[in-house]
Image (cartoon, helix red, strand yellow):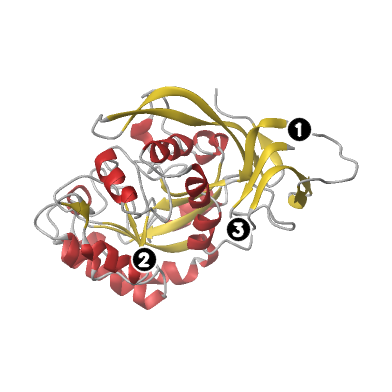
Amino acid sequence: MAGRLFCSKTGLDGPGCVAVRDGRIAACGPEIRGVSQQTLDFSDCVLLPGLIDLHAHPACGGSRYGINPDRYMLPDGVTTVLSQGDAGAANWDDYLENTILGSDTRVRLALNLSRAGESNPQRCFESNEDVDIEACAKVARTGGEHIWGISVNTGKRSCGDLDPRWVMNCGLEVAERTGKPMLVGLRRASDWSIEEQLVLLRRGDVVTYCFSPGDECLVAEGQVRPCVWQARERGVLFDSGHGMASFAFSVAETAIAEGFLPDTISTDKHKRHFGPRPMHTLPLAMSKLVAAGMSSDSVLKRVTHRAAEVLGLEEEVGALVQGQCADIAVLRWNDEPVPLFDTRDDERTGGYWETVLTVRAGQTIAPCP
């Protein structure tokens, strides 16, 4: 039982209970009658579906960015995570066995256009030979439910000396051949305008790092660019993708004030996040968006049901509905003002979400200390 149940799919919002049996939600609502083997009471917390991180780097080996999702994400309330290209066609089999099938966390993959995924020592595209359209398309078609889409990053850190336009076109070709959406990291340098990039994207494609600073960010002259609104009208989706360099309060605040909210919220969490305190988590990234002007309810929606819709998992996760997988996050809002920093060390002060408990398929997981 909890002081507040929150489910944006059903509109459930208020005190209530969730009953779990055999890894599924057996019942939920303001009041549940029956006998239970164990009762947990979270009177000062919000209980919601397990959090969904739409862009991170879960990988148990084979990726220079990879982190163990069961150790570094699941205890934070994240029960489902989409990998941004940790594996490509050449190391897909290992990724499937060791990370997707080897983790308690539900992992989906945006298959890297690079055949090496993120296993190269410097960048995913170190030469033209890393792009193998045929191999990528074959794996994307045969990978089943485990492969959500195609990961394409046209930034300088990923492309190096390769022509980013060629890289994008190769990704589009794979996506068209396979009927898959793309998870796209746009180029933010002045050598390729955001308008020229966005016009290439299709309904269902997801632009990550949407609140990045830079020459070609979402806002210009104090407002969201017209080409960004036009892309949204065509059905292009936008994900926050915090990362180490991809979240600026100034960009987020301008967009949110105009009513341009991200479709989903993500961490881009990877190895380089280890060490800083507080630890980079999805609840912390959510808290920063509250500080930037989003309502708590709109934030919670985008890490539960809305994210499940984007991943095509809305019948299995993302809601407190009888029969769905018992993936649950219990969060507590701490009102004590703390400094919240973006990736340029710009500071805001605000409250923050704390993870109290995670339930994955009916099994409880303690939060990280």
- In the rendered image, which residue does mark 2 sit on? 205
Q: Earlier in the sequence, mark 2 or mark 1?
A: 1
Q: Which of marks 2 and 1 is in front?
A: 1
SS of the residue under disc 3: loop
* Residue 304 vs residue 29, the one in the foreground: 29
Q: Earlier in the sequence, mark 1 or mark 3?
A: 3
Quadrant of residue 110 within the rendered picture: bottom left
Q: Where 363 falls versus 170 (above or below)? A: above
Badge 2 density bin: few <14, some 14–19, many ≥20, Cα 10 Å = many
Quadrant including the N terminus: top right
- In the rendered image, which residue does mark 3 sit on? 9
What's the distance in space between the residues labelled 3 and 2, CA to CA? 22 Å
In contact (CB < 8 Å): disc 1 and disc 3: no
Q: Residue 216 carries which label?
A: none
Residue 261 in the image, given as x and y percentages of width and height? 38, 53
Kindly tell me whether residue 132 is visible in this rendering: no
What's the amino acid at mark 3? Lys
Residue 369 in the image, given as x and y percentages of width and height? 55, 22
- In the rendered image, which residue does mark 1 sit on? 40
Residue 16 in the image, given as x and y percentages of width and height? 74, 42
What's the distance in space between the residues labelled 1 and 3, CA to CA? 24 Å
**Seen from this angle, which residue lies furthest left?**
191
Residue at (23, 51) in percent of width and height = 158
Q: Nearer the viewer, mark 1 or mark 3?
A: 3
Q: Where 199 falls versus 367 (above or below)? A: below
Residue at (24, 65) in percent of width and height = 198
What's the amino acid at mark 1? Leu
In contact (CB < 8 Å): disc 3 and disc 2: no
